Amino acid sequence: MKVTEEQPASTEAAGVLCEPEATGPSTPAPRWQIAVALVSIYIIWGSTYLAVRYALKGFPPFFLGGIRFVTAGLLLFVVLKARGVKSPTRQEVLGAGAVGALLLGIGNGGVVYAEQTVASGLTALGVATVPLWVALFGGIWKQWPSKREWLGLVVGFAGMVILNLDGALRATPAGAIAIVISAIGWSFGSVWSRRISMPHGFMASAVQMAIGGGVMLLEGVVHGERIAHPSTVAVTAEVYLIAAGIVGYSAYNFLLSHTRPALATSYAYVNPVVAMFLGALLMAEPITHSASIAMVLIVAGVALAATSTKGQGK
């Protein structure tokens, strides 16, 4: 989640905010790099929903996410410093910390909290509304959705309504609310990240994960969480999530900086399918008729929004 090197930072909000003009990719990147990054977040992030379910068997939700991202962020930071990457400025740390709090403290925090009671596939399907929220939040910076994007929003949110009528979500209203808040936090953070001063390259991922993970640890303390004796399965799942965090989060940052937000958030097409398939295969999570209908509507809505061109219906 970087902004372009060319973007001048303003002094608003204690030096965190930048001028909001930049809306496109910062610099072009080879197509093969974009393809690798997309496959990474498609498959790796799709599998993390199931990994979270296993990790929750030994870790409370916010400590699970906090340990995951603080460890991943610090490891990445050490590697980058060993390779001679310069440390971020105070202004860049503030920007990355704010975005990390939104994406991880609220975004990922809502996911792990919800997965205590909601199936991994349903959670992924709820988070699939991120591209729709991204299109809507663009209006804050006068980038209102086009007619095609508005149609996608209507179709996608219809799917979200049907999803929330599913018996599994109606039985766990707190989980359903957490999923919606998670998608909103992640979406706003993704849009805002392109307009504030950020560290360059993978350093942005390192700082965001370290600070965002710290926010999650604080949330765990506030909720009175305790870690007892996690099983080998839970620890293995947590180690996988740490590795997935470094690879997937860095790939997402790369895509946000080098592609349109619609393409960067297109993982929402694939993640629910991967998560539902793995959940059904490995944890016997049921796939209901209403969830299937919701998935079709949400994916269709995301497709409409993501394939809209800039000039349509403005």
Image (cartoon, grey):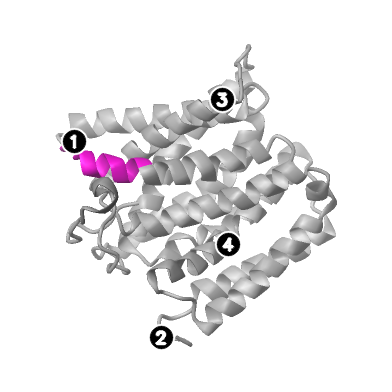
Q: Nearer the viewer, mark 4 or mark 1?
A: 1
How many C-alpha atoms fall within 10 Å of the one at disc 3: few (<14), some, or many (≥20)? few
Q: What is the C-alpha distance between the residues marked 3 and 4?
A: 35 Å
* Mark 2 and mark 3: Cα distance apart in space: 47 Å
Question: Which amino acid does the dot numbered 2 rest on?
Answer: Gly
Kindly identify the amino acid type of the residue bearing the numbered disc 3: Val
Q: Secondary structure at mark 3?
A: helix
Q: Amino acid at mark 1?
A: Ser
Task: Give the left or right position of residue 82, taking residue 246 as reference.
Answer: left
Q: Quadrant of the C terminus?
A: bottom left
Q: Which residue is mark 2?
A: 311
Q: Which residues are magenta?
A: 85-97
Of circles 2 and 4, the one toward us is: 2
Which of disc 4 and disc 3 is earlier in sequence?
3
According to the image, label 4 marks what residue? 269
Magenta span contains residue 93 = yes
C-beta proximity under 8 Å, tags 4 and 1: no
Chain-order first, disc 4 or disc 1: 1
Q: Which mark is residue 87?
A: 1
Q: Residue at x 51, y 34 (%)?
A: 241
Q: Position of residue 130 (x, y in %)?
A: 55, 59
